[in-house]
Amino acid sequence: MHQPDITPRQSLYFDYQIYPPAPLPPESAERAPVVVVGAGPIGLALALDLARHGVRVVLLTAGQQVSEGSRAIVFTRRSLEILQQVGADSVLVEQGLPWRFGTSFYRGQAVFRLEAPHDPHDRYAPMNNLQQQVLEASMLALIARQPLIELRWGHRVAALACDEQEARLTIETPDGVYTQRASWVVACDGARSSLRQLQGLQLEGESWQGRFVIADIKIDLPLPTERLAFFDPAWNPGNTVLMHREPFGIWRIDYQLPPDETPEEALQPASLAARINAQLQSIGFGDKPWTMDWCSVYSARALTLADYLQQRVIYCGDAAHLLPIFGVRGANTGFQDAQNLAWKLAAHVQGKAPLALLQSYSTERVAAAREIVAEAGKSTRFMTPPTPGFRLLRDATLSLALSQDFVRPLMHWRSSRPHEYLHSPLNSDDDDSAQFPQGPAPGAVMPSVRMAADHYLLDESHTGFTLLTFSDRPVAPEIALAAEQWRAQGGLLKIVTLPLAVANGEAWARYGVQADGAAYLVRPDQHVCARWRQLTPARLLHALARALGDATPEKTT
Ligand SMILES: Cc1cc2nc3c(=O)[nH]c(=O)nc-3n(C[C@H](O)[C@H](O)[C@H](O)COP(=O)(O)OP(=O)(O)OC[C@H]3O[C@@H](n4cnc5c(N)ncnc54)[C@H](O)[C@@H]3O)c2cc1C
């Protein structure tokens, strides 16, 4: 019998609620189109997105409360744009702390300051700090109002069987065991994914030796919200320390441990106090009182499954990949997975798209994870050099940056960013992309443009495709007719016309449009899939068919 822990987790700023376990469903319950396993941030976002696309979701989660401790605290602009689509961005806007600078210190001296790009056409700040469990709680409030989602607290998946038609999950609850049938199961069950183990899947990539303590303390520090990195501080020689401000008077201090120290030793209260005091002392706040809220030990891994589609199970978030938190990649990457998957899975279960569309989720997101694995290796080697040679190089770069300006641009955020599906099979093979001097190529995220005081181009996105036409005239009747034909077959397509005057020409400039008549086709997840200097109805219908997973629609040119 599964008995989740029902003692509320302790926190200085967050009231943990115990959610009652869901009763056993009736034995006659029919097969669910989609079961999502895991109500962490990614399972919650995916369930909301599937429901937005009209799909009924059973959401199972083993525990009866939200996640322990702050865990992910930095959410990127792209994550907010994704959460906006499911109506979950407001908690980050209202309670989060926006920021865009990072200062790095080497042996106590500031060596460089990085600035994340931001301009008036972005609705959100590049980075936004909020504790993960606060975000989860706000998504749960949205789920409670969503009739298409049935959330079952305290239901743990213990076994799995799949055939051509369906998956059968054996589920343990405090009241007994039952079987849930599903056309598709999405594994959002986190880093130690039970489903991954039940299917005997191996992750590929790298794990590193370096361990970090992550400590959240309540303290009043008169410092701005930015990322502070301390390389080789006197109190922790050879190691790295990071600090971030969180809402509710909390600061996170991450410090690297010597290689021979165990997590148990590191989490002893005396050891924690000595190191936190040493860090505060080193930045001139040794006299400030503080209280521990939560702490944990973390080590960096950069691993992914080679294929996110395994029989009737689809992997998403930490269940699919484990990425280093340097560069804020964990939850932020997972939101991109969820957004990529939701519209494709919805189209497939609603009979509007072939299995190939679902397979493109794996192709696109595994490629993204592999790119991150390669990049994350660089960040992690910089933060925790694995050999004396890497340390020598890293220290030489940092010490040179003390006196030489030319070194500074070599420092790079390498933080989580939206991935570009440049080689996606969903991109049109019949467009004019090569003739655009700039603007987003097929596969990239559509850039936002501020169109009015509180209205941005990204606000126009919806559950279907969007055709952006750059023209001072209304859309041509033959294009409107083709759109009508496509809608009549169940497709969703919205046409947004952008005259040259919009945002003082900025929309045309950002999309590399040089003459009236250009057009972009954008997928439901805001990624471009085709662009033309001149559009014809046949080219539009061809691009739409291809973007829905039809690899061989008839070409027109
Ligand atoms: C200390 C720490 C700090 C971090 N800092 C950052 C950061 O700054 N930025 C960032 O982007 N990321 C960060 N991360 C990573 C981030 O927390 C994860 O990437 C994120 O939680 C992944 O979300 P998820 O929904 O995929 O999995 P999880 O949040 O792990 O959720 C998994 C869910 O599955 C449920 N579950 C598990 N097994 C079963 C089962 N058998 N049956 C039913 N339900 C099950 C669990 O109860 C849970 O609800 C951090 C992580 C840690 C540990």
Image: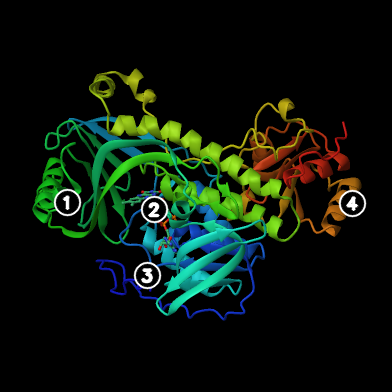
**Residue for badge 3:** 65
Q: Which residue is mark 4?
A: 481
Q: Are marks 2 and 3 in contact (CB under 8 Å)?
A: no
The residue under the point 53% across, 44% down is 120
**Of pointers 1 and 3, the one earlier in the residue sequence:** 3
- The residue at the point 45 percent across, 62 percent down is 91
Cα–Cα span, label 1 and label 3: 25 Å
- Residue 228, given in percent of the width and then of the height, sits at 28, 41
The quarter of the picture where residue 147 lies is bottom right
For the question of whether residue 46 can be seen, the reply is: no
As measured in the structure, the alpha-carbon distance from the residue carrying label 3 to the one carrying label 4 is 51 Å
Count of labels shown? Answer: 4
Where residue 92 sits: x, y (%)?
44, 58
Residue 192: assigned label: 2
Alpha carbon separation for disc pair 2 and 4: 51 Å
Label 1 crowd bin: few (<14), some (14–19), many (20+), radius 10 Å:
few
